[in-house]
Image (tube, helix red, strand yellow):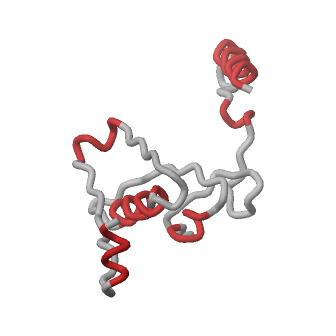
Amino acid sequence: MIDTLRSIIGLEPRSYMLRVPGMEENEGLLLLGDPGTGKSQIIHQLFGQIRWRKPPEAGVCYDPTGEFIEAHFNPATDIILNPLDARSPYWGPGLEVDYSSPATSATDRQLIADSL
């Protein structure tokens, strides 16, 4: 309602920056809200903050629509892990197997088979 009143008198709605204390980043973050409430915008803010950290840090994003790749992907530093994307490096389950030891090899193959 306040944002509606602001727009009527010509003021823009306030924008807020979500900041997560560094010590709490690994605790997890859950964003809930109706469509259009700004969940994606918060994630865009967080990626922007991560990108400029010194020393550089990494983030992992599951992005089925490509929204975050379009906005944040840097081919010089970022890796796309999607077998359907031409920019993705080659990977196959066989690359995860340690063939130097027959016992480890059998265990690795069984683990991969179970996970698939």
Which one is in front, 98 or 85? 85
Which image quarter holds the N terminus? bottom left
**Residue drawn at the location 73% of the way across and 21% of the way down:** 109
Q: Residue furthest bottom?
A: 10
Task: Give left or right: position of 95 versus 15.
Answer: right
Residue, x 33% and y 80% (percent of image)?
Answer: 12
Q: Say whether residue 18 is left or right of residue 60.
A: left
Q: As displayed, is residue 5 above or below residue 17?
A: below
**40 and 61: which one is in front?**
40
Q: Quadrant of the C terminus?
A: top right
Query: Residue 15 occupies which quadrant of the picture?
Result: bottom left
* Residue 99 location (% of width, % of height): 69, 26
Q: In the shown orientation, is residue 26 left or right of residue 23?
A: right
In the image, is residue 39 above or below residue 113? below
Name the residue nearer the viewer: 6 or 60: 6
Q: Residue furthest top?
A: 103
* Residue 59 position within the rendered picture, expressed as x and y whole percent measured from the top left: 44, 52
Residue drawn at x 22%, y 42% as measured from the top left: 23
Q: Using the rendered view, name the quadrant where residue 9 is placed.
A: bottom left
Q: Give the x, y percent position of residue 98.
A: 65, 27
Asked if 96 appears above or below 67 in the picture, the reply is above
Q: Residue drawn at (29%, 64%), measured in percent from left and top? A: 17
